[in-house]
């Protein structure tokens, strides 16, 4: 039986009250804080950097899952490791040397992963399966919260699940399979059945009514 993890994305949080917001999702049972980093270059939006990660780190003890939507990747990856990230993922097409970037992240003490956009092919997995702690599949095009789930990603999730299972059956290390974008109460079941074990949710969690009861309500319904 698989272990499921819920990773609320702070992209949809109230940034004027970010400390309270991350504490509220931790109290509500979040397994990770998903931290979206956008650079107005790799994606057409701009969010926050290592300083804000450091501030979040001081507020909660739940692991911080940093999703880098930036180009270039390496220097920011190192800065986020110093700022208290636990897991760092990046888009392979945004890195000049994927193997080097993965090593750099792991040497800095973080878990490392690759992210695939809905139309990005999976061949970047070919030579690095043994270097990965997580694979993140985007189920929207990256850049904004609140978009609709792209259903054609379901067979892609199943394909990656099969690759991970074959890797583990051949003696490889475990690899988490995270899905990000448009996850709601009415589709999380299908995403789980396709093979995901880690679920990002921005607008579904932070759009919930009243902070504590609301966040806890969504997170517990996600687990059903
Ligand atoms: C999109 C981000 C997502 C986003 C998810 O580029 O990577 O993490 O915040 O938000 P929802 O759950 O609203 O699609
Ligand atoms: Zn994300």
Image (spheres, grey):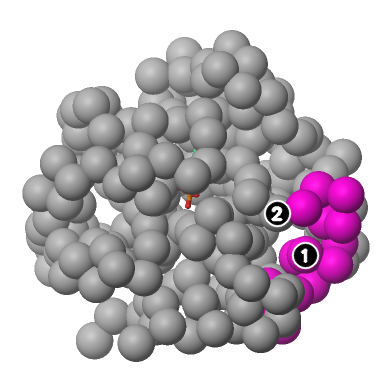
Q: Residue at x 33, y 32 (%)?
A: 117
x, y (%) of residue 155? 10, 49
> Is 41 on the left or on the right of 116, as rendered?
right
Q: Are marks 2 and 1 in contact (CB under 8 Å)?
A: yes
x, y (%) of residue 213? 66, 85
Q: Residue at x 72, y 74 (%)?
A: 211
Q: Residues within 10 Å of mark 1 (few under 14, many from 20)?
A: many
Q: Which residues are magenta?
A: 14-29
Q: Which residue in the protein does label 2 denote?
A: 13
Can the viewer see residue 173 in this picture?
no
21 in magenta: yes
Name the foreground residue: 152 vs 86: 152
Can the viewer see residue 200 in this picture?
yes
Q: Which residue in the protein does label 1 denote?
A: 21
Q: Secondary structure at mark 2?
A: loop
Decide which of tag 2 and tag 1 comes sooner along the chain.
Answer: 2
x, y (%) of residue 124? 26, 29
Name the foreground residue: 214 vs 36: 214
Rounded to the nearest angstrom, the CA distance separating label 2 from label 1 is 7 Å
x, y (%) of residue 46? 68, 24
Q: Residue at x 36, y 70 (%)?
A: 185
Quarter containing the N terminus: bottom left
Q: Secondary structure at mark 1?
A: helix
Name the foreground residue: 194 vs 129: 194
> Is 185 on the left or on the right of 34, as rendered?
left
Name the foreground residue: 55 vs 134: 55
Per the picture, the main secondary structure of the magenta-coloured stretch is helix
Q: Residues within 10 Å of mark 2 (few under 14, many from 20)?
A: some
Q: Which mark is residue 198?
A: none
């Amino acid at each position: 039986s698989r272990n499921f993890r819920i990773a609320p994305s702070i992209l949809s949080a109230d940034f004027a009250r970010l400390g309270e917001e991350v504490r509220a999702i931790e109290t509500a049972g979040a397994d990770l804080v998903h931290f979206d980093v956008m650079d107005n270059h790799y994606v057409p939006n701009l969010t926050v950097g290592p300083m804000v990660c450091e501030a979040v780190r001081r507020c909660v003890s739940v692991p911080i899952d940093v999703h880098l939507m930036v180009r270039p990747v390496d220097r920011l990856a190192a800065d986020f490791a110093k700022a208290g990230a636990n897991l760092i993922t990046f888009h392979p097409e945004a890195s000049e040397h994927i193997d080097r970037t993965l090593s750099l992240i792991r040497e800095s003490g973080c878990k490392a992963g690759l992210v695939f956009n809905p139309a990005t092919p999976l061949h970047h997995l070919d030579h690095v399966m043994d270097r990965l702690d997580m694979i993140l599949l985007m189920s929207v095009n990256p850049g904004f919260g609140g978009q609709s789930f792209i259903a054609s990603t379901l067979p892609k999730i199943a394909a990656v699940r099969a690759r991970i299972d074959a890797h583990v059956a051949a003696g490889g290390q475990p690899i988490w399979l995270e899905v990000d974008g448009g996850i709601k109460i009415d589709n999380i079941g299908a995403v789980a059945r396709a093979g995901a074990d880690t679920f990002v949710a921005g607008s579904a969690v932070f759009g919930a009514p009243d902070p504590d009861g609301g966040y806890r309500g969504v997170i517990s319904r996600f687990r059903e």
